[in-house]
Amino acid sequence: DSWVDKTATMLLKGRPANREYVYDVQRVTEYTEQYLIDRDITFKKSHLAACFWMACVLRIRTGFPEYTQAEIAYVCDTTTVSLRKSHDKLLGMMNLNKDQEKVLSVDDFVAGVRYET
């Protein structure tokens, strides 16, 4: 969580603090990190960036502020290419596609809900 908090603080710099977003990122990160640990995969900063991005995508329907992949990659000290690759790999491992991700909420995602599209 401290990695999420530190990164979120840098991302939110100059913007109003959005504790709901940070909480959602923490939940997505915890779920994803445990998912990777269970498969003996090391959680890297590109995975963290992907979690920040996933939280943005999962929150789109609720109208919360969205951050760009470039903003997220910068504060996670990675590249947008690494963010996208990690995001795509994670979706594939979790049996999700981008269309399905857009209709899920954070609650659905961490509960393991997967809708057919």
Image (cartoon, grey):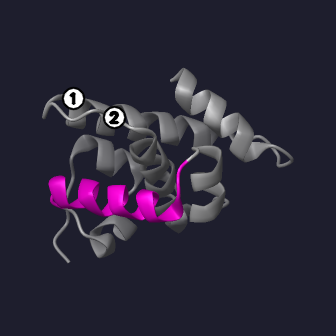
Q: Residues within 10 Å of mark 2 (few under 14, many from 20)?
A: some
Q: Secondary structure at mark 2?
A: loop
Q: Secondary structure at mark 1?
A: helix
Q: Front-most of 6 and 62? A: 6
Q: Is residue 84 visible?
A: yes
Q: Which mark is residue 43?
A: 2
Would you say residue 70 sits in the magenta stretch?
no
For marks 1 and 2, give the CA distance.
Answer: 8 Å
Q: In the picture shown, does residue 45 fall above or below 55?
A: above
Q: Residues within 10 Å of mark 1 (few under 14, many from 20)?
A: few
Q: Earlier in the sequence, mark 1 or mark 2?
A: 1
Query: Mark 1 belongs to which amino acid?
Result: Ile
Q: Front-most of 67 and 46? A: 46
Q: Quadrant of residue 40?
A: top left
Which residue is drawn at the image coordinates 20% and 65% (left, top)? 115
Q: Quadrant of residue 3?
A: top right
Asked if residue 105 lies left or right of residue 92, the reply is right
Of all residues shown, which one is farthest toward the right? 14
Q: Quadrant of the C terminus?
A: bottom left
Task: State the image coordinates of residue 99 (x, y, percent, origin top left).
Answer: 31, 75
Task: State the image coordinates of residue 82 (x, y, percent, origin top left).
Answer: 42, 58
Q: In the picture shown, does residue 70 fall above or below 72?
A: below
Would you say residue 82 sits in the magenta stretch?
yes
Task: State the image coordinates of residue 37 (x, y, percent, origin top left).
Answer: 21, 29
Q: Which mark is residue 37?
A: 1
Which residue is drawn at the image coordinates 73% and 39% (left, top)? 10
Which residue is drawn at the image coordinates 27% and 32% (left, top)? 42
Q: Evaluate if marks 1 and 2 touch, with contact meaning CB atoms under 8 Å apart.
A: yes
Range shown magenta: 78-95
